[in-house]
Image (spheres, helix red, strand yellow):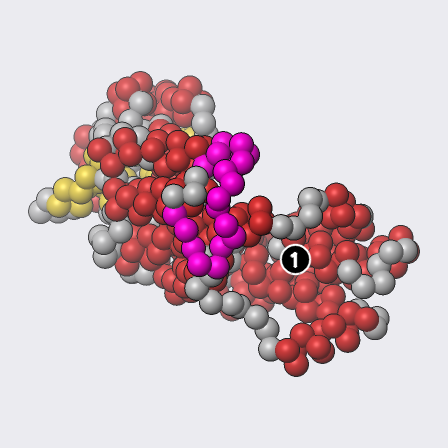
Amino acid sequence: MIPLTMSFFAGGSNRALGRGFQKAGLFCGSIIVLFSTLGVVVTALAGPFGVVRLASSPWVNGFISLVFDALGLSLLGAFEIALPSALLTRVDQASRGSGVVSTLSLALTFCLTSFACVGPFVGTLLAASIQTAGWAPALGMLAFAAGLAMPFFLLALFPSFLRKLPRSGPWLERTKTVAGFIVLAASFKYLANVDEVLHWGLLTRERILAIWFALLLAAALYLLGELRFHAAPSQSDLSLSRLLAGLAVLAFAVSLLPGLWGRKLADLEAFLPTDEQTTVSADATYVSYSGPAWRKDDYEGAVAEAKLEHKPLLISFSGYTCTNCHWMKVNIFPQPTVAAALENYVLVELYTDGTDAASERNQKLEQAKFGTIALPYYVISDADGHELAHEDGLTHDVNQFLEFLHTGLASAAVARQKQAAGQA
């Protein structure tokens, strides 16, 4: 949206600062009004979790994947995406006039494009503010939309920075082709979200890595002149910058190969399907991530087990498409110190973004009992369901999460002592 917005404000009769301020103000003011209204309406119709589930919906992710496929193939020269000439003429005429209609249209496009992406943030905000009465949800959305629009307001006010970009030429055509490979790679990430939510099991972690490796290898070979496209410019002269870019892309592609044999790829794991081990017993389903096993979507069973074993309960509210949840499972849970601390708990993982009845129950439990819809969200409670501690969101600090676990164990010990003293 940044290049699209900048090209819009850099054109037409925006040279005067006052004119630019007026148009930028209209654009960002429209974003604030439209985004706030859209968020409140969706929440009223579907509830806060309805906003969050936009980001994990198979339909939304499938649609985004198809759009990315079309854009990627277009960038590679398979076909040209162009608006009808009559529509372009109308838009050009509108931009030559007051520009109000075109500015409002751009603002509406921005809201619709970004709404699904920021759904989890908006949903969490609305879930927190909806607990209070009055104008809290509307004011929260107003503040969020204003913060979202502010960078675009500043960029739209000073579009002259766009003139400092280098002139177009063969390098831009090559950039477009490489971007096509990257966009195609991104489309498989969204398709993997569909696969995880619907439990197809087709796009596994290793298969996604293999597809990414093939696409990035093709991009590297293209930059190095070993792969040619009919519509692309001549690759006869291999410049130093293109050589370095090709080698950089090739190095990144090769760095994915260890992941095909099970090696973890640090932060990149957040965007890959979770590599989990599933065990089905007579009474429950368990999942593990190179560590202790977690009950899956079985809160009542976990509570019963906690009472039986006299252990505290650790609840992990998670999501199939939650990148922060994936990161925690791969980089925090398997740590030896964390895994050892987890052995002292009854572990249960509750997914809230699936299409099944279990996800709906878990959504209601998280919102009603703990007053949030954040993902990930970790709660330590005793066997009677009383909260002892909670950890909200992603942390890259192993010691912080370990301290949370130790705090829960200490609180559980104190609670047991009080209960024993009361019984005595």
Residue shown at 28% from the left, 19% from the top: 336
**Which stretch appears magenta?**
227-246
Q: Position of residue 407 (x, y in %)?
A: 40, 22
Please identify the quarter of the rendering in which residue 333 is found. Answer: top left
Q: Indicate whether 333 appears above or below 303.
A: above
Residue 120: say if magenta: no
- Quadrant holding the N terminus: bottom right
Vertical placement of 418 versus 182: above or below?
above
Q: Is residue 168 visible?
A: yes
Image location of residue 373, percent across then percent down? 46, 48
Query: Would you call the spot at circle 1 few (<14 residues within 10 Å), some (14-19), or many (20 or more)?
Result: few
Disc 1 designates what residue? 4
**Residue furthest to the bottom:** 86
Residue 384 lies left or right of residue 148; in this view the side is: left
Q: Nearer the viewer, residue 106 or 224?
A: 224
Q: Amino acid at mark 1?
A: Leu
Residue at 23% in and 30% down: 290
Question: Which residue is found at the position 56% from the left and 60% from the top?
Answer: 113
**Residue sitting at 36 percent across and 37 percent down?**
253
Q: Dot 1: what SS? A: helix
Quadrant of residue 277 in the image?
top left
Main secondary structure type of the part rendered in magenta: loop
Does residue 256 sit above or below 42 in this rendering?
above
Q: Position of residue 302 (x, y in %)?
A: 24, 40
